[in-house]
Image (cartoon, rainbow, N blue to C red):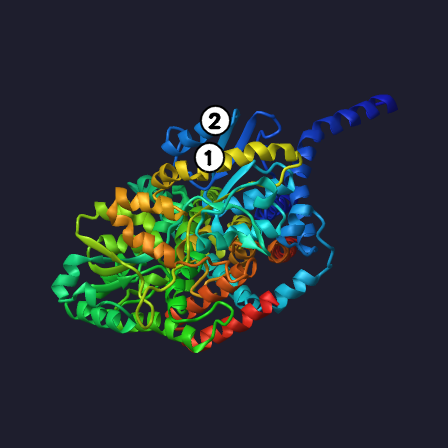
Amino acid sequence: MNVQSRVKSQWAAWGFLAPIAVYLVAFYAYPLYRNVDLSLREYTVRSFVMGDAPFIGAENYRAVLADPTFVPALTHTLAFTALSLLFQFTVGLALALFFNQHFRLSHTLRALFLVPWLLPLIVSASTWSWMLNSESGIVNTALGIVGVGQVNWLTSPEWSLVSVTIANIWIGIPFNLVVLYSGLQTIPDHIHEAAALDGAGGWQHFWHVTLPLLRPVSAITLLLGLVYTLKVFDIIWIMTRGGPVDSSTTLAIWSYRLGFGNPLPQFGPGAAVGNLLIIMALFFGLIYIRVQRRQQA
Amino acid sequence: MRSSLTRLSLISLAAAVFAGGMAGCTAQGTGNDSPTNYAIWDPYPQFDAGSAWVALLQKCGKDAGVTVTRTGYDTTDLTNKVLLAAQQAVAPDVLIVDNPVISTLAEAGVLTATSETKIDTAAVEQNLLDAGQIGGKTYGVPIGANTLALYYNKKVLAAAGVDIATVKDWASLNAALAKVKAAGKKGITFSAIGTEEGSFQFLPWFWGSGANLTQLDSPAAVSALSLWTDWLKQGYAPNSVIQNTQTTSWQEFATGEYAFAENGTWQLANAKKTGFEYGIIPVPAINGGTAPAPTGGEFVSVPVQKDTARYSVSQKLVSCIASSENSLATTTTLSYIAPTKQVQAKQVTANPELKVWVDAVAAAKGRTGDNLGTKYPKISQQLWTAVQAALSGSQPPQAALAAAQKAAAAATK
């Protein structure tokens, strides 16, 4: 290939890249830049409108880190994410293995398990909120029948985080089920046969054959689950508004509350909390990728 | 496999992370660059293009010789929408917005003062106008007012042997609630959710105790919060009030199981649909009399425009919407109490049931009044947090309010 045609094809390559590059800059890079910029300035409603907010460096971050809400919000975020991932993954995997048996009706049943995924979040969260209502909720009615007293699922500081976590686990199971199920499909039958011939029992089969072969898919599932769960907002907001007080406030809820939940918005600190969340997701994601790379090396 | 998997992880990670960031801000144009087209924004999305409300706006435009483009937003969205629009210099010509937001928007420099746009506010009741006045200037005119009172279920009270005429102060209200509970019915429902709605509902009791928003932990304030907390402890009020909005609280009352509900003027139409006999009394103050409830309702205002020549038409539009002649039509459409004595009298003549609401509005107080202005939202946030803390049992009323006062003082310094 001569130099001229190489230059030409390079231009053509850039031409093909341009739409996606413009798209990425306009819809991802610029908003992200604006969010970082918001978090480094002291915005009042006045300076937001006038566009003359003074640059204050890391002051918003310092204020956020020193805020009495920070530590609870961080621990709630971590607990919410860890518990959600643990249960979503194990239940999803158990169901995937179950449906991988291909019994009668397995298709219908599997389809039913996808319902939580198909419902709009506002519908499922409102339904959970009704079911867990202290006075008239079906859960407390059912508990009452077996003699358990009223549990204030959404209105007591002890239970509110547990309740939103349970709802989130329920919503996340179908995603894990679908991805892990398709992962199971990719394991060739002859490997299962070979293991059976070698006399592997059920547990041995699972621990030494299925799980290792499922590792790449599990990694993706957990990674996506982590990022999705860190930023969960709608379920918690609809069910408890992050309350009572801060008892179910996560970083995502706090960020929204600072920016939009008060008639007097605090855009700077709100953006700072949002950025901390992004950094957390990136941090965990990078650790994950590194571990995964080492395992595969 | 390995490298493609890693790349896939990175891409999905990056995509999910970016999607999680707070989205960037854009504002639509309002079409107010045309000299004969005027934009009006309101927080009444429940009224569509065929409603009497929109017909009124169109007529006002026609009378002023312009066309009107009206957009209805959800009330919680409107503040941010307006701030963004003002930032992009595309604010509407006329803005109808919830009254406590006026001081925030005025502080932001988004609104013009009525002295500049020559809007007449002389006939408006002072307690209603308060919420729109900051630093001696007035930033709009109330379109109508609503407030809170106590609805009661006549049948439940009769079964419990309570005469509503005896309920005059907190002690007699407590006695009534005790009787209702003894009769196997539920006492009272209200909304104590952790948002502005929770503060709005708590304020009649807070002010009715003699407390002031500048001192959240005064003994009077503690007595108000203790009243609510004791209701939950005694089982007079359901635990669900902690997450109730005013709508879900109304749904509880509509079951017919509750003796009392604290709710607003806007539920009158729904009250007729409940199928049981109801009555309304003002929220009692601690030692009798009517407690000042917060004023609700919107202000009509004129956002700042580059082209100040537009104000003269905007002024005509505002006068048309809020003028005495049209006020009766406007407030009837929105089921509000009129902001002027004159029109209130007409309303009561047309519908005597409104008398109790006219009295309640007369006793009501603006939330951003007492020259609190933009300090109010910060104080209010601490107040609803204290209410949530006490009702959920995470802190006793005294400690919750002391913490609130400390935080509010720091935030408004």
| Residue at 47% over, 75% down | B217
Residue A269, compared with residue B408, is above or below; it is above
Q: Position of residue B256 (x, y in %)?
A: 19, 55
Tell me, yes or no, whether the two marked residues, 1 and 2, touch with CB atoms within 8 Å. Answer: yes
Determine which of the numbered discs, if any, sits on residue B362 in the image. none
- Residue B354 picture location, percent across and down: 28, 49
Q: Secondary structure at mark 2?
A: helix
In the depicted structure, whether residue B176 falls above or below residue B314: below
Q: From the image, which quarter does the N terminus of chain A lie in?
A: top right
Indicate the chain on which mark 2 is placed. B
Q: Relative to the observer, which residue lies in front, A264 or B165?
A: B165
Of A25 and B185, the residue lying toward us: B185
State the count of labels: 2
In the rendered view, does A179 fall on the left or right side of B13? Answer: left
- The dot on residue B63 is 2
Q: Residue furthest right?
A: A3
Residue at which label 1 appears: B320
Instruction: Find the distance from the CA under tag 1 to the CA under tag 2.
Output: 9 Å
Task: Count residues near mark 2 (Cα–Cα under 10 Å), then give few for <14, some for 14-19, many for 20+.
Answer: few
Q: Residue A15 appears at what percent x and percent y?
A: 73, 26
Q: Amino acid at mark 2?
A: Asp
Q: Quadrant of residue A140?
A: bottom left
Q: Nearer the viewer, residue A121 or A109?
A: A121
Q: Work out whether residue A57 can be spotted.
A: yes
Among the two numbered marks 1 and 2 on one chain, the one whose residue lies closer to the N terminus? 2
Location of residue B74 with respect to A257 vertically, above or below: above
| Left or right: B354 as drawn, with respect to B50 | left
Residue B77 coordinates in the image, percent (x, y): 50, 45
Both on one chain, marks 1 and 2? yes
In the rendered structure, the residue with mark 1 lies on which chain?
A: B
Look at label 1 and name its amino acid. Answer: Cys
